[in-house]
Image (tube, helix red, strand yellow):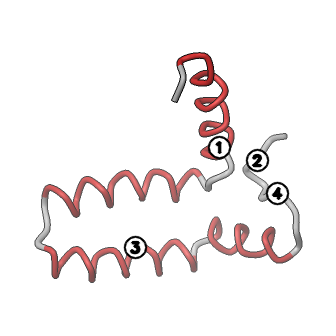
Amino acid sequence: MPREELDGHIKSVTDDLVLNGPNATITCKQLLYDTTNELSFEDSIEYTAEMIARLRISEEGQEGMTSFLEKRKPNWVKK
């Protein structure tokens, strides 16, 4: 990527990141750490499935799904 395009690319990526649920972002970071540093491959599969299931049934997960179906931004997006 040319240097003059870097600022625009970084802004685009960060704009996308703030749309993610805050708890989902925290959980994803923890999941990445745990599955690469703490768990075997087999345990990582089970752990990942459990974390995804927990996020989906959480209040944040339900708001994310509802906002998607209603074609609106989730309540954690301030814009």
Rounded to the nearest angstrom, the CA distance separating label 3 from label 2 is 23 Å
Give the residue drawn at x 58%, y 73%: 58
Q: Position of residue 41 (x, y in %)?
A: 15, 75
Rounded to the nearest angstrom, the CA distance separating label 4 from label 1 is 11 Å
Asked if marks 2 and 4 touch (Cβ < 8 Å), the reply is: yes
Asked if marks 3 and 2 touch (Cβ < 8 Å), the reply is: no
Asked if marks 3 and 1 touch (Cβ < 8 Å), the reply is: no
* First in residue order: circle 3 vs circle 4: 3
Location of mark 4 (residue) = 73
- Vertical placement of 6 versus 14: above or below? above
Location of mark 3 (residue) = 51
Give the amino acid type for the residue marked by disc 1 in the picture: Val
- Vertical placement of 36 versus 4: above or below? below
Q: Position of residue 71 (x, y in %)?
A: 88, 68
**Which mark, residue 9?**
none
Quadrant for residue 9, please give it.
top right
Relative to 5, 44 lies left or right = left
* First in residue order: circle 3 vs circle 1: 1
Q: Position of residue 51 (x, y in %)?
A: 40, 73
Give the amino acid type for the residue marked by disc 3 in the picture: Met
Quadrant for residue 5, please give it.
top right
Residue extending farthest front: 2
Give the amino acid type for the residue marked by disc 2 in the picture: Val
Give the residue drawn at x 77%, y 59%: 74
Rounded to the nearest angstrom, the CA distance separating label 3 from label 1 is 20 Å
Location of mark 2 (residue) = 77
- Viewer-proximal residue among 22 and 19: 19
